[in-house]
Image (cartoon, rainbow, N blue to C red):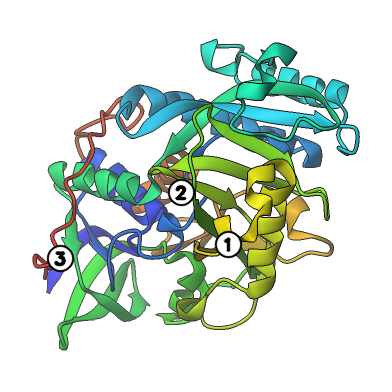
Amino acid sequence: MRQYDVVVVGGGIHGVGVAQAVAAAGHTAVLLEKTALAHGTSSRSSKLIHGGLRYLESAQWRLVRESLRERRILLEIAPELVHLVAFHMPVYRSTRRRPWQLRLGLTLYAALGGFDRTTRFGSVPRREWDRLDGLDTHGLESVLRYFDGQTDDALLTRSVMASAEKLGAELALPATFIDAELVGDRAIVRYSSRGRPHEIEARVLINAAGPWANTVATRIRPTALLPAVELVQGTHLIVPGHLARGIYYVESPRDGRAVFVMPWHGEILIGTTETRFRGNPDHVAPLVAERHYLLSVLRRYFPAYRQSALVTHHQAFSGLRVLPVGKGHAFHRSRETLLIADRSSQPRSLSIYGGKLTGWRATAEHVMTRIAAALPSRSPRADTRRLRIDPAPAPDASAVRP
């Protein structure tokens, strides 16, 4: 039976981030992924590396501060993967948040980011409004501009895994997790690949299965306490078009939620929604109501798209967030990551619930702190705060790993 210090289940951004952190610390690791890297939520996000300006409204100071720190780190270590982009916030007479409120929020955002060069913001002069990609100027009072990061989430995930492999981590793909048994100070993990069963041993099993985390957790014996979480669907649309000036951070006229309208591979990406999801995560799909919701936002702010012919042909995709159960709208729920271990000292299994794309490296760092006592002493190979991440080559569909 092959032995590893850590076995990771799930090839999303958090799974590959943990694999990289484990390998960087000098430990042996293998990641099990059943379909493809970034197959789920990690390829269906809003593609943003940001501090979460809207989380200031729910007083999630620690999350925003950490996210801004991670944004700064990623801009430095992955300059070909994470880019700083201008964000525009138009304020109309009907906008719920007034200019002074937004300026106050941006000032606090800059303060939490340490007032570095990436936190600068200001107003777009009125003489430039007609150059804002056809933005509706009727009733427009002000346009604020600040900067945040954008990335290709799937490419970033593959690139982090490539970095992990360079450090010695292994990738088992396709590999479907079957179950695990915690015995003594070890985890016996069973999985299948191409119809053949495999059994490996780990000091620690990390459940990074995202929306499938509870499914995986219930197959680990004994099962740790399952947190009270629910799945929330986020849908995005891709429509033909071109945005030259950056990303638009707008307010849904229907419910006041923040929606992004952004350039994406020569087209326009609009998102996201927040709809409670009950069902099999494998079957998540955009709802008709979500399509109408997002198209109504696009048409409200960009009059050219009020002609239905321009948006008849569009693509849509949906991802799932894991959020704590709570009353009220998901928009106001905590985005903090939950780490649930089978025991407080020397855990044999740890499950990751929730988290943001921006915080993947910090989450992996927190995981390493939680499981450190269960791992042997090793000589570190790298520091993930400084380790450069280069773009991974495009995946070869014919080269499926064992």
Residue 158 point in image, percent of width and height: 27, 50
The structure residue drawn at horizontal position 70% and vertical position 30%, both measured from the top left corner, is 89
Front one among 235 and 313:
313
The structure residue drawn at horizontal position 21% and vertical position 41%, both measured from the top left corner, is 163
Front one among 330 and 47:
47
Residue 95 point in image, percent of width and height: 86, 37
The structure residue drawn at horizontal position 43% and vertical position 81%, both measured from the top left corner, is 221
Q: Which mark is drawn over residue 402?
A: none
Residue denoted by label 2: 370
- Can you tell which quarter of the image residue 11 is in? bottom left
Q: Indicate whether 209 appears above or below 74.
A: below
Q: Is residue 335 visible?
A: no
Q: Which mark is drawn over residue 397?
A: 3
Q: Is residue 45 visible?
A: yes
Front one among 115 and 90:
90
Pointer 1 and pointer 2: residues touching (CB < 8 Å)? no
Q: Is residue 105 left or right of residue 130?
A: right
- Circle 3: residue type: Ala
Residue denoted by label 1: 235
Q: Earlier in the sequence, mark 2 or mark 3?
A: 2
- Can you tell which quarter of the image residue 99 is in? top right
Q: Is residue 17 left or right of residue 228?
A: left
Pointer 2 and pointer 3: residues touching (CB < 8 Å)? no
Q: Indicate whether 402 appears above or below 305.
A: below
